[in-house]
Amino acid sequence: MTLPSAEEFAVISVRPDISDVVIEDDEPVDSLYSEKLQRLLTSALYASFKPGVPFLATANVGLFYTLKAPPLVPDVMVSLEVSCPENFERKEDRTYFVWEMGKPPDVVIEIVSNRKGHELGRKLRDYAHAGVGYYVVYDPLHQLTELQGSSLAIFEREGTAFVPYESNWMPKIGLGLTLWNGKYEGVTVEWLRWCDEEGNLLLTGEEQAETEHQRAETERQRAETERQRAEIERQRADHYLRLLREHGINFPES
């Protein structure tokens, strides 16, 4: 019997047969709020996050870390130094296989919609086993009694388990999380948002455009105010010049 070479063994070990693996089940599972929140979190990253390396941010995409267990499906998943495939012809490129991507995700976020999601039980253990760096649980309706009324909990992996993480800033990935009360897509509620180390929000493309529009409008108003001030000064100078001429005082024209 001929044993495979080291290179052939490496390929075999990291590229298992996935022909029978179901990666898309087409089952709608999210509320309107969860769907909007997922889009807010992913779109803000692509608009404002500049880590200096490629990254992938997804919502409701399967995370396969072993063929011996069903996939995890985080509400939001972020992985640095990972690029989105150029096309999706291969089955391997249509979901997140850790052995294909080369690493586990850096952070996953679970949004609590009911008390049956096991966010602080089975999922907490499974994401640790999957090698995820940070695990975030957001409970906007305060359904998890373990959080003692808080809506946000962050965990960091130490060894093979997660431990509570006391800060909202995650230096290993250069991202932070904050709770923000404001309007997004016409809805004003509390939203979980990405932020920088100083707490400044990472804006979506629409928010950036609106900020730029407001900046341009402020500059236009400032220029208009300056023009009106200059016009008032000119009219005042013309008025005093007429008064002087009426009193026989003339100035040579320049």
Image: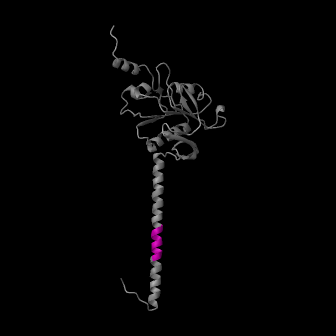
Coordinates of residue 8 in the picture (x, y in percent): 34, 18
- 221 and 3: which one is in front? 3
Coordinates of residue 131 in the picture (x, y in percent): 49, 27
Residue 252 shown in magenta: no
At x 44% / y 77%, what residue is drawn? 234
Horizontal relation, residue 190 to residue 230: left or right: right
Examine the rendering and report whether any part of residue 120 can be seen.
Answer: yes
The answer to whether 77 is drawn above or below residue 179 in the figure is above
Numbered marks: total: 0
Part of the protein shown in magenta: 225-233
At x 57% / y 27%, what residue is drawn? 124
Coordinates of residue 235 in the picture (x, y in percent): 46, 78
- 25 and 57: which one is in front? 57
Residue 231 shown in magenta: yes
Q: Main secondary structure of the magenta part?
A: helix
What color scheme is it?
Answer: one colour
- 134 and 65: which one is in front? 134
Coordinates of residue 11 in the picture (x, y in percent): 36, 20
